[in-house]
Image (spheres, grey):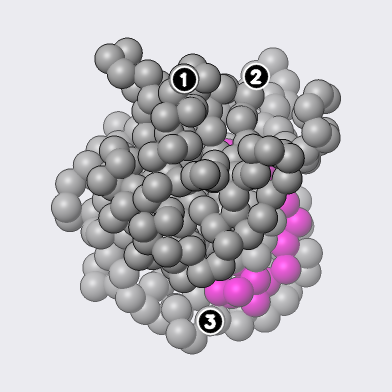
Amino acid sequence: MVELLKARINSYNSVEVTDPCTLSLPQTGDFKRVAPISVRGFEERLWFSLHKWKKEGRKGVFIEISREHCELIPVAIRAGFEFHHAEGDYVMLCAWLQDPHENKLPPGPVHFIGVGGFVVRPRAGVINPDRKNHSDYELLVIKELSGPSANLSNFWKLPGGLADQHEDIKDAVMREIKEECGIDTEFGRLCVIQEAHHTSAASGASRKGATDMYCICALTPKDPDQEIVIQETELAAARWMPLDEYLSLPFYSRENTAYFKMMQAAADVALGNAPGLEVGSYDLGFGRGVKHTLLSAAGAENRLELVTAKL
C-alpha cells in the first residue's frame, strides 16, 4: 500500500511537508522515516498524497526539499509544483490545489531590510548646541571600498548595511556601525524608510524582483571621543563630518529628491526637532507569544517619511 507523506495542515487549510523522507502510516497514524528515499518511491507517494489532499479540500501544498535530496525537485515540478523560495540548504516548492479558482497562496519572501545609522554628536568646542543649527553638530560618515558609490567623487554615506535574518532593526544598525567604524552607539528613533522596488536587471541578480526597505535610524555615540576604527575590508574611509557640510553635498542637497527628503527628515529626528518612531520588542498579545518589533508614533507631531523608488 502506498503511504502518505508526513504533513501538517496550517491555519489557512494548506499542507506543509518539511521532510519528504518521513511517511505517515494510515493504519496507525504513526510516522516512519525512509532514508534515502528513491525518486520513484517519492513520486508514487507524492501523487497519492496530492489526490488525498485534493479530496479533503486543501487549498495548496508547500514542500521543502533539502539539498541532500535535490534529485526529488524534478518530480515535484512534474507534479505541478512551482518554486516558491530558496535558502542555502533547501528549496521550497508550492502547488495550488483548487483550480480553476484563483491561486491565493502567498508569494515567497520578497523584502530586504537595510539600515543606515544617522549618528550625531556636538562639534568640538560647542558647549550648548542649538538643535536648530546644523553647524553645531557632526555626523559619522563613510566611504565605501566597493559597491555602487565607490567610484563617485566626494561621495560620503551613512554607515549601515543589510539586517541579518531575524535581526531587529535596532540591533542591526548598532551592529553595522560597530563593525564598520568601531563606534559603540545608543539607539534613538527610527527616522525614515525608503522603499525601493528592484524591477530591472540593473539591480543585480541577488535582488531581482525584490523590494528594499532602507531604514535610517538616529543614534548617538556612547563615548563622543571614541576613536574610529574602520573595517578595512569594506571601507576606504570614515570620519566625523559637519552636519551642515554633509547636507550640502550635491547628492543630498537637490530639493524634491528622495535623498534630500530622507536626510532632512533624519536630521530633524536626530536633533530632536521631530519625534520619529520608537522601536521596541513586545509580546504580540495572542498566539504563541512570539516577540514582535513595534514601530510606534512618539507624539502627536510624529513625522515619518516613506520614500518609494523603482530601481
Mark 1 and mark 2 residues within 8 Å of each other at the beta carbon: no
Query: Which residue is identified by label 1?
Result: 55
Q: How many marks?
A: 3
Q: Is residue 76 above or below residue 290?
A: below
Q: Are marks 1 and 3 in contact (CB under 8 Å)?
A: no
Q: Which residues are magenta?
A: 177-192
Which residue is at a point 18% across and 46% down the rendered structure image? 200
Identify the element where label 2 is drawn.
loop
Task: Please tell me how crowded label 1 is: few (under 14), some (14-19), or many (20+) other residues with Cα within 10 Å.
Answer: few
Q: Residue at x 57, y 22 (%)?
A: 12
* 211 is higher (above) or lower (below) than 150: above
User: Residue tagged by mark 2?
Assistant: 301
Which amino acid does the dot numbered 2 rest on? Glu
Residue 193's spot in the image, x, y percent?
A: 49, 38
Is 129 covered by the magenta stretch? no
How far is the residue under mark 3 from the one under mark 2? 38 Å
Identified by mark 3, the residue type is Gln
